[in-house]
Amino acid sequence: MSALDAGATGTPPGPLVASGNLRRRRRTDRAMRGLATGAAVFAVAVLVIVIVTVTEKGASQLSIPFLTKDPVDTLNGLEGGIANALVGTALIVALGAAMALPFGVLIAVYLTEFSTPRTARPIRLVLDLLNGMPSIVIGVFVYGLLINGSGDSGWAGSFALAIIMVPLMARATGEMLQLVPRELRDASHALGMSRWRTIVGIVLPSALGGILTGTVLAVARAAGETAPLLLTNGIFANGTTVNLFGTGVPNIPVTIFQLSESAVPSDHARAWGAALVLIVLILIGNLSARAMLERQRRKIQAR
């Protein structure tokens, strides 16, 4: 007698017995949970190993002179610090962010406020492809466009980093714009404000914290890129310079590469020290950006 027939006649149904199919599903579920947990633990372990290794090998190089002095060529290799690379990296990344931010915000505004599903899908696909494109390909493209025959320059490196930052900024900004309540837009339209004034005066200010967070996240990603800078800004003098046009600008990623390729053992130690500085800066940027993003999401959703 089925459970339905038993209920209709008032007779209590018999006990449910696990079938072979149910047991197989449970085993599969436990196996997939174990694989997922193992993959997560493996990813965290790799990150911990990298950080611990770089810290052990580079911590001995950290000092105030290492961060505040320029390198000096000697018979025993380079001596001094990486102040020139720190200043150059800051300038290159800042210029790249300044070039990428308007495009990233405008793309996000179009996708969330003006586009139809038919037009949004290919644009999002292009952003995903650009985000996943190897940075060396972007470096080759910028080299052929701006460098070939004219020499390395800091602004060409910034342009390459801007291409890397655009999809990150567009995605982060788009997510924050989607969190802005629709009621704010409707209320603005009801008061007679045009669509564009609503976006500029209400939507964007409401998502400003998220836009800044996406910018910080993109900057943290671009600051560690080496391949584009090797091709566009790989030749520079040791001194500190703020001229991004017409000359190469020292930067941390290329400095690490050059020191690691040196035949002098002391340069290898300096490379580990510079790598530790770069990792700390990137970790601080990533953690700060994610904390700001979560805070902004809660703030918008609470409205």
Image (cartoon, rainbow, N blue to C red):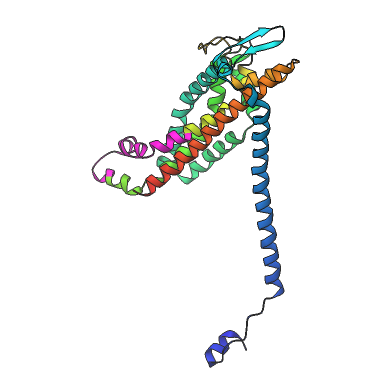
Q: Residue at x 45, y 44 (%)?
A: 294
Residue 49, percent across and down? 68, 37
**Is residue 299 placed above or below 253 in the rendered structure?**
below
**Magenta span:** 188-214
> Which residue is depicted at the point 48% across and 32% down?
216
Q: Position of residue 102 (x, y in %)?
A: 44, 28
Can you tell which quarter of the image residue 34 is in? Answer: bottom right
> Quick check: is 277 in the magenta stretch?
no
Q: Residue 272 location in percent, x, y?
A: 66, 24
Along the line of sight, the residue nearer the viewer: 120 or 70: 70
Residue 91 horizontal side relative to residue 33, left or right: left
The quadrant holding residue 71 is: top right
Going 72% across and 10% down the picture, which residue do you hit? 76
Q: Residue furthest left?
A: 191
Say if residue 220 shows up in the picture: yes
Quadrant housing the N terminus: bottom right
Residue at position x 36%, y 49% from top? 302
Q: Position of residue 21 (x, y in %)?
A: 70, 71
Q: Is residue 235 above or below residue 57?
A: above
Foreground residue, 295 or 136? Answer: 295
Outermost residue to the right = 263
* Front position in the image: 297 or 295: 295
Is 162 drawn above or below residue 296 in the view shown? above
Q: Is residue 227 visible?
A: no
Secondary structure mainly formed by the magenta segment: helix
Reply above or below: 175 against 271.
below
